[in-house]
Image (spheres, rainbow, N blue to C red):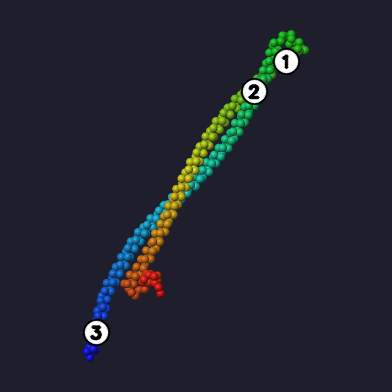
Amino acid sequence: MQTKKVSVRVQIFTLLIISSIFLWLLSITPLFAQTEVDALKSQISERTNRLSEIEKEIAGYQADLKKVGGQKNSLQKAINQLELERKKVQADISYTQNKIGATDLEINKLKLEISNTVDEITVNKKAISETLQSLNEIDDDSMIEILLQYDNLSEFWNKIDELEQIRKVIGNEVDSLVSQKILLSQKHNENTEKRADLIDLKEQYSDQSQILVGNKTEKAKLLSATKSEEAEYQKLLKDREAARALILKELRDFESKLQFILDPNTIPPKGTAVFAWPVTNVII
């Protein structure tokens, strides 16, 4: 009988202990739940703040990309414009070079004409000299000697008139050739000056072309640097977008956990951390 009483007492004591533990668990469960809720809210707030920062960084990188893209387009347009200007200057150089060549031909032609004119003047002067010499020889001879050379006096005077006419014609020809030589020399000098001006113009075009090439090279370097900067911003933007996606996923998981704690009847959406394994390296 005593044994039965002891057993009943043990059972009652055990029930009391279990009831106490159950009641204690019931009392602390809200505390644990509240602690987890507070932790989740804190994590959600932290992630939200971080998400806001990342959104600002993304907006900043997008603005930088837009700015850099505008600079890149401007530089590319500038390079294209410089290339067009360079091609135009090269065409001007080619045109000027052709004009120099044509002027050289004209100068050579004038040189040849001047040389021929000088030769003609020399020949005509020689003819005049010979004519004058003939007239002098006539003057040196006595009248009787001169008349004996001709059949009659009329033939003598005809000879004198003929020599005088020849002298006049040749003299006029020499004067004309001298005037022509002067005119040709003037043209030669004008073309020489024109050629010098064309050479100066060509040099100016060449200098301009070098400046354009230098500017194009500088713009190309800036464009290359801008493209590198753009690629860097794109990489940073991609990283920030990946970080934003990760935080959004974490926020969804935290919110699902919080909702599940506050309302156990609510089933979190598939893929949230609520359904994740409670431990890592799970082996089934």
Give the image quarter of residue 125: top right
Q: Residues within 10 Å of mark 1 (few under 14, many from 20)?
A: some
Q: What is the C-alpha distance between the residues marked 2 and 3? A: 159 Å
**Among all residues in the image, which is located at the extreme bottom?**
1
Q: Is residue 116 above or below residue 59?
A: above
Query: Which residue has dot 1 on it?
Result: 159
Nearest the viewer among 237 and 92 is 237
Question: On the rendered structure, is 98 left or right of 56?
Answer: right
| x, y percent for residue 118 | 63, 24
Query: Which residue has dot 2 on it?
Result: 121
Question: On the rendered structure, is 54 left or right of 214?
Answer: left
Report the amino acid beneath label 2: Ile
Labelled pair 2, 3 in contact (Cβ < 8 Å): no
Q: Is residue 247 above or below residue 132?
A: below
Q: Secondary structure at mark 3?
A: helix
Labelled pair 3, 1 in contact (Cβ < 8 Å): no
Mark 2 or 3 closer to N-term?
Answer: 3
| x, y percent for residue 110 | 61, 29
Q: Secondary structure at mark 1?
A: helix
**Res. 52 mark:** none
**Res. 10 mark:** 3
Give the image quarter of residue 102: top right
Placement of the N terminus among the 4 image quadrants: bottom left
Q: Residues within 10 Å of mark 3 (few under 14, many from 20)?
A: few
The residue that appears at 41% across and 52% down in the rendered structure is: 67
Q: Is residue 246 above or below residue 73?
A: below
Foreground label between 2 and 3: 3
